[in-house]
Amino acid sequence: VQLQACGGGLVQPGGSLRLSCTTSGATLSGYHMGWFRQGPGKEREFVAVIKWRGSPAYKQSLKGRFTISRDNAKNTVSLQMNSVTPEDTAVYYCAVARTSTIMSQLWIPDGYESWGQGTQVTVSS
């Protein structure tokens, strides 16, 4: 599965940004889709996941600001980011996990089998 993330850029604190990830090589409906991020000098961390049937889950601290969604017909998963802060500055990665992946593995990078190249999000005034 190949993934292509886009939509990153420079955004002011309090603003919004929408990231998208398009897949090819496989039908998106057969996978869980996740977003991770890696800030400067930090480890890659879980942001959100949307399971193949559509149920989402979020990093607790991001719940209410970020929304993950998927369009299986378009093989696309999106991440709507609202009320962003400088702490949201990171490279954001999309990834796919097989539907057989247990829930606890969806919170960590090792649970995913393919990754996009990442898109930079910078929150700054």
Image (cartoon, rainbow, N blue to C red):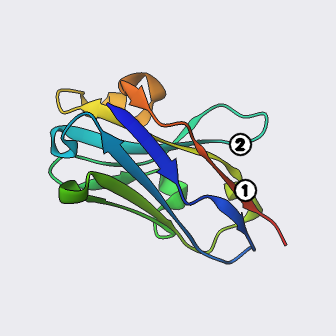
Judging depth in this view, the residue of 68 and 21 nearest the camera is 21
Q: Is residue 85 left or right of residue 19?
A: right
Q: Residues within 10 Å of mark 2 (few under 14, many from 20)?
A: some
Disc 1 from disc 2: Cα separation:
8 Å
The residue where tag 2 is placed is: 39
Picture quadrant of residue 26: top left
Rendered view: 79 above or below 97: below
The N terminus sits in image quarter? top left
Picture quadrant of residue 23: top left
Residue 15 disc label: none
Q: Is residue 67 left or right of residue 81?
A: left
Evaluate if marks 1 and 2 touch, with contact meaning CB atoms under 8 Å apart. yes
Give the residue displayed 65% in from the left and 69% down from the top: 84
The spot of residue 94 in percent (x, y) is 45, 42
Rendered view: 117 above or below 79: above
Q: Is residue 55 left or right of residue 115?
A: left
Judging depth in this view, the residue of 7 and 121 nearest the camera is 7
The residue where tag 1 is placed is: 87
Give the residue displayed 37% in from the left and 33% down from the top: 2
The spot of residue 101 in percent (x, y) is 24, 27
